[in-house]
Image (cartoon, rainbow, N blue to C red):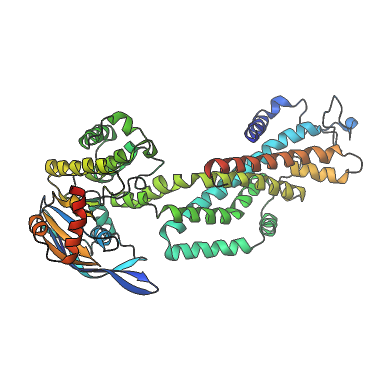
Amino acid sequence: MSLIFISLLILIAVFAPLIVKYDPLEQNLTDRLLPPSKKYIFGTDDLGRDVFSRVVYGTKISLSVGIIAVGISTVIGIMLGLAAGFFGKTIDTVIMRFVDICLCFPTFFLLLMVIAFLEPNIYNVMIVIGITSWPSITRLIRGEVLSIRERDFILAAKINGISTLRILFVHILPNTIGPILVNATLGIGGAILTESALSFLGLGVQPPIPSWGNILTIGKDYIHLAWWLSLFPGLAIFFTVLFFNLLGEGLRDIFDPKY
Amino acid sequence: MILQVKNLTVGYYRNKQIIPAIKNINLNLNFSEIISIVGESGSGKTTLAYSIMNLIMPYEGKILQGEIFFYKDNKQINLLSIDNQNMRKIRGKNISIVFQDPFSSLNPILTVGEQITETVIAHNNIPKNTVKEYVFEILSKVQIKDVERIYNSYPHQLSGGQRQRVCIAIAIINKPDILIADEPTTALDTTIQKEILNLLWDLQNSFNMSIILITHNLYLTLNTHKIYVMYNGEIIESGYIKDILKNPQKEYTLKLLNSAKRWII
C-alpha cells in the first residue's frame, strides 16, 4: 500500500511536466487567489500561479532533497559505523564520542546556523540535512557490526585468509542491509519534514522554485482568505511522511521478525 | 616435522586478571600424520587450535609463553611472532580449520560458490572462469553429488551434512599442509558423523596433509596415529593410539575410554 503510494509519488515527480496544465512559475494576475475550481483544481495563489502545478513540481524537490540527504547521511554513517564497530578500541572510542557530541547538539539549531553561513539553495539544503543526520545511523550500524563480527562465519572468513576490506564490505555490510534500509526509509520522511520546515522559514529552497515548505509560507499570509494555499501542500507533506514511515515499518517487519 | 608447539601457555582476561586456559603445551606434528586432541569441554582444545592459527584476539587473551613453529620448504616460521599480513597468507593456504557448527560458519547471504571462490582467489592468482572448474572438482572430491545445484545454493538451502562438506571443501581447496578439524562432527547426527570422518581420512590420503582432530569422543580417534589427552588446560597423556587404548596410564583417559566403549557396543 505505502509502496504503491510512494511509487506513485516518484512517477509524479518524474513526469511532473506532463501532468500539469500550467507552468508553476507562470503568473496570471487576473486569476489571483481563486478557490479550487474546474480550471484550477487546487486554486491559485497571490500571484495567480496554479497551486496544483506548484504542489506537483514541489514533489520533485521534496523527494529529491529527502532521498539525496538520506543518501549522504547513510554513506557517512556506513563508513564510520563499520570502522567503529569492526576495528574497535581507539577508533571506536574517537568516533563514538564524536557521535555523542553531535547527538547532544540540537540538530535544527545546527541546521539554521550552517544554512545562515551558506547560501540557502536546494543543494546546500540536501548537503546540510545529510551531514547533520549521520550520527544516529553511525550508532545503529556500529551496533549491527558489533554483533555480526562475533559470528562464526566472520571468523571462518578470517581463517580462510580473506582480506579485511573484503570481510568488511562483502561479509559484514550486506548482513546489516536490513536495518540500514529501514532506517533510511524512515529518515527520508524526516528529511522531507526538515526541508519543509527550512523552506517555510525561508532558509531552504528559495522562491520562486516551488517546494512544499515555501508554498506554505505564502499560505501563512493568506490563511484567513485562501485556505487552499496551506491545505494542499500540507496534505502532501502529511501523506508523504506518513507513507514513508509506514513503508519503513513494513520493511522492518520483513527484516526483523521480532516486531 | 611440520608443526611444533613448544611450552605454550595462553590466558584469557577475566576481571583484569589473566587466567591461563592452556598450560605448558608441547606437541609435535609430522608430515601427513593424523593426531587427535581429546578432552572435555573447557579443557583448552579450541584455545590450542586458535593459538596455532594466531587467532587469540588481543582484547580476549594473551600468549603468556611458548612458541609455535611451522616448517615449510626447510624454513622455520614462528607463527606467534609473524606479522598479520604474512599470517593471512598462511591461514587458509597452509593451515585451515573446519569448525564444529556448519550452521553458523557459512555466511547466510553469499552462495556456496561465492564463498569457496573467494578463498581460492585470496591465495592464488588465477582467472575467475578457471576457478569455477576447480571449485566443481573440489566439491565432487568432498562427495557432493549435485555439484552444479550446491554451487548456486545459499547455505540455508543445504542440510547439515552438506554444509559441513562445503566447509571442508573451503578448508581443503588450497591444499593445506595442516587441517585442523575442531569437533567437525559434533553438530551432526551419528550416520553423517561417520561419513564426514571417512571423508576426512580419504582426503588426508589423497592430499597427503596432516590433520589435527579435536574431539571429546575417544571413539572418533580410532584412525589417528597419535593421541593427546587434555584435561584442565594441560596435556596429561600422549602417545600412539594403540598404546593408549590398550594401556591408559591416567584414570581420566580410562574414563574417556569407558564412555567411548558404549559407542562401539
Would residue A88 appear left or right of B77 to someone viewing this image? right
Farthest-out residue, bottom: B17
Percent of width and height locating residue B182: 25, 53
Foreground pick, B37 / B211: B37
Vertical placement of A201 versus A17: above or below?
Answer: below
| Image quarter hosting the N terminus of chain B | bottom left
Task: Tell me where residue A192 sits by quadrant.
Answer: top right
Vertical placement of A230 versus B219: above or below?
Answer: above
Count all numbered tags in the image, as a single digit.
Answer: 0
Foreground pick, A218 / B36: B36
- Residue occupying image coordinates x 80% and y 46%: A217
Task: Tell me where residue B10 sits by quadrant.
Answer: bottom left
Percent of width and height locating residue A6: 65, 34
Percent of width and height locating residue A141: 50, 53
Would residue A52 appear left or right of A166 to someone viewing this image? right
Farthest-out residue, front: B265
- Residue occupying image coordinates x 62% and y 39%: A247
Vertical placement of B235 versus A173: above or below?
Answer: below
Q: Is residue B69 visible?
A: no
Q: Is residue A68 visible?
A: yes
Percent of width and height locating residue A194: 69, 49
Foreground pick, A113 / B214: B214
- Residue occupying image coordinates x 32% and y 52%: A158
Would residue B180 appear left or right of B12 to someone viewing this image? left
